Amino acid sequence: MTRVAVVTGGTRGIGAAICVALGAAGFRVAANYAGNDDNARIFGAETGIPVFKWDVSNYHACSEGVRQVEAELGPVEVLVNNAGITRDAMFHKMTPEQWNEVIATNLTGLFNMTHQVWAGMRDRSFGRIINISSINGQKGQMGQVNYSAAKAGDLGFTKALAQEGAAKNITVNAVCPGYIATEMVKAVPEQVLKERIIPQIPVGRLGSPEEIARCVVFLASEDAGFITGSTITANGGQYVA
Ligand code: NDP
């Protein structure tokens, strides 16, 4: 059976690796993105994965986006809530805009997207929701009060919704990556990475997007049907939750 999977923020970084891995595992994949059209076009051309532009922080845009995906590919059975942003600042300098943008994309985005597919999953008695949270939602990170709050919220969302979905064969799980080599992390100065971040990672390196993608493929698979409300922590031993 070919299941349809939607990956938000699926055209770059971890999301792109998730799309490719789900495609290789036999899913029909749709990749969402927010605004980087050139990148999305190249990703779509290179992989053959259809790309769809909408903003996960906008409920109505999500509704319309999922409608388009379902019209082209069929009912969504796997949703990977991966889109995420950072707007870092120490709390005493954090603006309401920095707070609101991060909460809107990284936390409210999960509500906006999951709400579009939940009724269909309940009707069909099958679903997989996989939320990409973060090590910084587990342990907190200075300079990221907004991001840590949103990512911790993603874990609460996961645990509560898992209890609602279980009787309908819908699993809801989270993956908490540590530092993964994507543009989000490459924005950190090389010296800070080498001298301050990598020494905190017991395996001695950044993770790869593919290592996170493999966790997602497992959670999306039939084999993972008894796993719900869980968090896979993939951080090279940096934080043992
Ligand atoms: P990237 O910055 O490399 O890519 C982010 C993706 O999300 C892009 O496709 C972007 O689209 C999309 N996106 C951003 N905002 C929106 C929005 N409002 N609506 C729709 N799509 C949006 O991120 P990463 O791959 O590094 O991170 C992916 C996820 O993993 C995030 O949730 C992040 O918080 C989490 N994470 C990452 C870690 C890391 O070390 N990299 C560590 C822990 C967690 P566009 O290209 O159009 O801008």
Image (cartoon, helix red, strand yellow):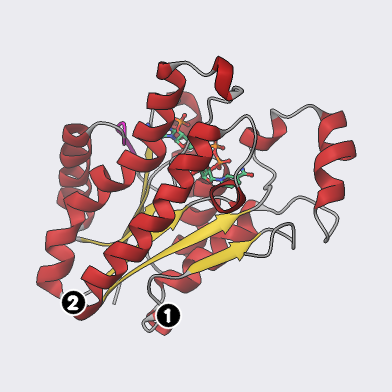
Q: Is residue 40 left or right of residue 61?
A: right
Q: Is residue 144 above or below residue 98?
A: below
**Which residue is disc 2 drawn over?**
168
Residue drawn at point x = 22 percent, y = 39 percent:
62
Secondary structure of the residue carrying numbered label 2: helix
- Residue 224: numbered disc: 1
Q: Is residue 215 left or right of residue 185?
A: left
Residue type pointed to by label 1? Ala
Residue type pointed to by label 2? Lys
Secondary structure of the residue carrying numbered label 1: helix
Does residue 35 show up magenta in the picture?
no
For mark 1, does the 10 Å Cα neighbourhood hold few (<14), some (14 to 19), or many (20 or more) residues? few
Residue drawn at point x = 59 percent, y = 46 percent:
136
The picture quadrant where one finds residue 197 is: top right
Query: Disc 1, ligand 1: is the CB inside 8 Å?
Result: no
Q: What is the spatial separation of the Cα atoms under label 1 and label 2, in whole angstroms?
A: 15 Å
Q: Is residue 111 above or below residue 118?
A: above
The picture quadrant where one finds residue 170 is: bottom left
The earlier-in-sequence mark between 1 and 2 is: 2
**Place of residue 206 in the rendered image (x, y in percent of width and height, measured from the top left):** 76, 50
Residue drawn at point x = 86 percent, y = 55 percent:
204
- The mark total stands at 2
> In which quadrant of the rendered image does the N terminus lie?
bottom left
Front-most of 170 and 91? 91
Q: Which residues are magenta?
A: 52-56
> In which quadrant of the rendered image does the C terminus lie?
bottom right
Query: Disc 2, ligand 1: is the CB inside 8 Å?
Result: no
The dominant secondary structure in magenta is loop
For mark 2, does the 10 Å Cα neighbourhood hold few (<14), some (14 to 19), or many (20 or more) residues? some
**Place of residue 47 in the rendered image (x, y in percent of width and height, measured from the top left):** 49, 48
Q: Residue furthest front?
A: 92
